[in-house]
Image: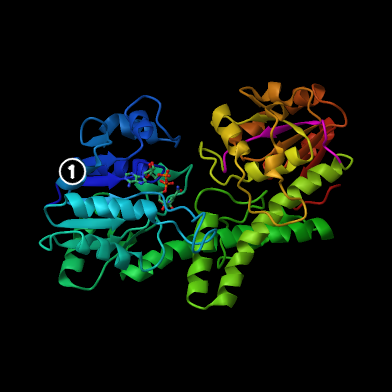
Amino acid sequence: MVKKICGIGAGYVGGPTMAVIALKCPSIEVAVVDISHSRISAWNSDKLPIYEPGLEQVIQQCRGKNLHFSTDVEKHVYEADIIFVNVNTPTKTSGLGAGKAADLTYWETAARVIADVSRSNKIVVEKSTVPVRTAEVIEKILVHNSNGKIKYQILSNPEFLSEGTAMQDLLNPDRVLLGGNDSLEGQEAIQKLKDIYAHWVPQDRIITTNLWSAELSKLADNAFLAQRISSINAMSALCEATGADVSQVSCVLSKNTKLGSKYLNASVGFGGSCFQKDILNLVYICESNGLFEVANYWKEVVKVNDYQKSRFVKKVVTSMFNTVSGKKIAVLGFSFKKDTSDTRKTPAIDVCKGLLADNACLSIYDPRVSEEQIRRDLSTNESHWDHSIQAKSTSFTSAKQVSVFADVYEATKDAHGICVLTEWDEFKTIDYRKVFDSMVKPAFVFDGRNVLDVDKLREIGFIAYSIGKPLNQ
Ligand code: NAD
């Protein structure tokens, strides 16, 4: 019987995932551990380190009962029957495979701690997204660093939640994927994990595969979703060139039952910590296996995404009389999607840097992202662009070029243009008449998420642009 679970890594995945296990399995003690003291103290406070609709209620219900957040990694690993490893697996920034391969440093450290402190058999679960065949390496670390008496079963249980709907996705998942080896012990370990999920997930949604299929399926899943976004974004550029309307095209595609409607909205580009890193990781794995054509195929998905961001910046600059120098541009939304405070790889970073490179003055408003976070994101040198309008990130030195507002009307006051970069629902109900009256004329709106009623905006007097639509509808 599983009595104790430890989740290593209390981030966007570890926090919500472990909280839902605690909620659904009240007889199991769940400890979520992290090396970051600030993150753990935030999980133990009223101000959680991440925003997800519905998360706070679950934390309040379980925290202090069977859900605990701690920095004592060793203690909780030692006590656990099952250890979920939810640590970050970012793209390597230097050395072999830099810019593509997954950096497994955090995973390796976690595995070494498990090996060091374990005194009983453990099931170790890969929750993080990892390259295919990672379990093989982890097993070596565990076995070679233990005294030989401890048995480890490594399972792959990749997480499919989307930020912004994490709690919904976890409480009612469309599938749970469990990968393990064929041995009796491997199958027993799978059964233990199945028994946990069976508390709330219907049997027919639990898929079991071998380890390598499970590891690769997660990378494939993200690559396919990102590919759909890049495909419709590529169509949006063609729509603008030909007078077709991307919303009409995507409506037609969505009615094709073979395609469905999800991930078909044209936008300024995808963001988030996973899509780009997981595709680049896939590219690296393909290249490592000598599959260069396949690697190139997936590379294009990232290239089109970069192109979409630079295309948007170019549209803003060219529409505003070929320069935004000294002009105030109100940026509405900074997180990579609505209902999350996460800004990792948000398209807003590259778009803002592109506008700053043309010397725009930005006034930024996001309902959930702090000023500190926005300033931190805009002061990094990171950029993957290789297209015509490149963000010269180092050129952004003046803090005066960026103001962050807590009120949308303040942010848009005296602005020459507005760029909508996140699809927050509240942007649909802004009083655009009031906004228009307070702006410099002609007043421009660039809807990077196709969420606004551009016809209404044009009636008010705005010059309005939305992705993939004819300019003068
Ligand atoms: P995150 O950066 O928010 O959280 C990772 C946490 O792990 C951090 O708090 C970090 O301090 C902690 N950590 C790192 N090394 C540690 C160690 N040795 N011991 C204890 N704690 C350690 O990352 P995330 O967004 O939660 O993603 C985690 C993994 O899940 C990644 O592999 C990611 O690809 C995958 N994933 C993410 C999402 C998503 O939407 N964010 C969805 C599915 C899968």
Left or right: 371 in relation to 52: right
Give the residue type at disc 1.
Ile
The residue depicted at 59 percent of the width and 62 percent of the height is: 227
Q: Quadrant of residue 153?
A: bottom left
Residue 104: x, y in percent? 39, 56
Give the residues drawn in magenta, as a range: 323-336
Residue 120 vertical position relative to residue 449 in the rendered view, above or below: below
Name the foreground residue: 281 vs 48: 281
Q: Quadrant of residue 337?
A: top right
Residue 231: x, y in percent? 65, 62
The residue depicted at 21 percent of the width and 63 percent of the height is: 144
Residue 178: x, y in percent? 30, 62
The residue depicted at 26 percent of the width and 33 percent of the height is: 62
Majority secondary structure of the magenta segment? loop
Q: Which residue is mark 1?
A: 28
- Can see residue 324? yes
Name the foreground residue: 163 vs 219: 219
Residue 236 vertical position relative to residue 136 in the rendered view, above or below: above
